[in-house]
Image (cartoon, grey):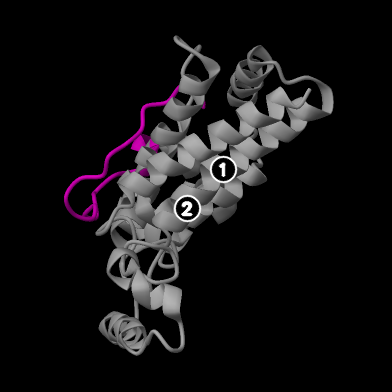
Amino acid sequence: MAKKTAVKSPKGPMTRSKRSASTLSKEVIVAAALDMIDHEGLESFSIRRLAKTLGVFPTAVTWYLASRREILAEVVELVTSDLSPARFYESWQEYLRLVFRKFRSAIRLHPHMAQLIGTHLIANPTVDLEFVERMLSALSYAGFRGDKLVAAYNTAIVSMVGFATQEFGPIPVEETDKWRDDIRGRLKSVTPQSFPTLAQHMSLLQNKAFIVRWQNGTEAPLDASFEFFIETVIGGLEAMLALR
């Protein structure tokens, strides 16, 4: 992605500063926006609240970035700024492994950004052509041509986005304990008579698999499943190459 340094938020929300409009900058605004989202969630984010945190009027913020959408696009670019290696060092397979892992690490650091990042990478208003070029180069080197190159590229992108954004997707912020208790209670009600395969594997699945979990990847990461997923995607691409 663009050559920016990813920001790790401090251990608490940013306090209101005495910052004047003259010391404001696009970079300061974007870093403050990310900090706010990290600690308060995406739904709470607004230009008015961001301006209050920075100690300026909302118009001072919109002078640099005109809308909430533009600010969020810049935040996505900041979080995903270090996804793409300049080149692949061993093989196209290892390149994909590295990109997938870096993407997941970025979302793991900023889980409130999970769904937003997925949306912006699929339909990005500020397209990162360098990232596209490098991914296409790796897949072209692998041997994909023509329509198969397009299909392989689409497969790689949606795979990269899909697993991590699901793993770190938000859980309900209201009545969270009740929501978790409801899920656990529902799973306890499963019997071999009603759902034999699910009941047989419940100890392996509960809170470790999509749909039957009550924590997201922040508290219960799916490391082994993620590595299995990467190898499945790469194995599928290799199989499609062999069909030529």
Q: Position of residue 121 (x, y in %)?
A: 59, 42
| Disc 2/disc 1 C-alpha distance (Å) | 10 Å
Q: What's under tag 1, amino acid-wise? A: Ser
Query: What residue is rendered at 54% in x and 55% in y?
Result: 68
Residue 1 versus residue 108 in the image, above or below: above
- Magenta stretch encompasses residue 22: yes
Q: Position of residue 75 (x, y in %)?
A: 46, 43
Q: What's under tag 2, amino acid-wise? A: Thr
Query: What residue is rendered at 43% in x and 52% in y?
Result: 113
The region drawn magenta spans 1-27
Q: Position of residue 167 (x, y in %)?
A: 41, 55
Q: Quadrant of the C terminus?
A: top right
Q: Position of residue 118 (x, y in %)?
A: 55, 49
Residue 8 versus residue 52 in the image, above or below: above
Majority secondary structure in the magenta region: loop
Looking at the picture, tell me which residue is in the foreground, 55 or 44: 44
| Residue where numbered disc 2 is placed | 165
Dividing the picture into quarters, in which one does residue 38 lie? Answer: bottom left
Report if residue 51 is visible in the image: no
Residue 47 versus residue 17 in the image, above or below: below
Q: Is residue 133 left or right of residue 64?
A: right
Do the residues under discs 2 and 1 have CB atoms within 8 angstroms? no
In the structure shown, which secondary structural element does the residue marked by tag 2 occupy? helix
Residue 83 versus residue 90 in the image, above or below: below
Report if residue 183 is visible in the image: yes
- Front tag of 2 and 1: 1
In the structure shown, which secondary structural element does the residue marked by tag 1 occupy? helix
Q: Is residue 38 left or right of residue 157?
A: left
Looking at the picture, tell me which residue is in the foreground, 219 or 144: 144
Dividing the picture into quarters, in which one does residue 103 lie? Answer: top left
| Residue where numbered disc 1 is placed | 159
Sequence-wise first label, 2 or 1:
1
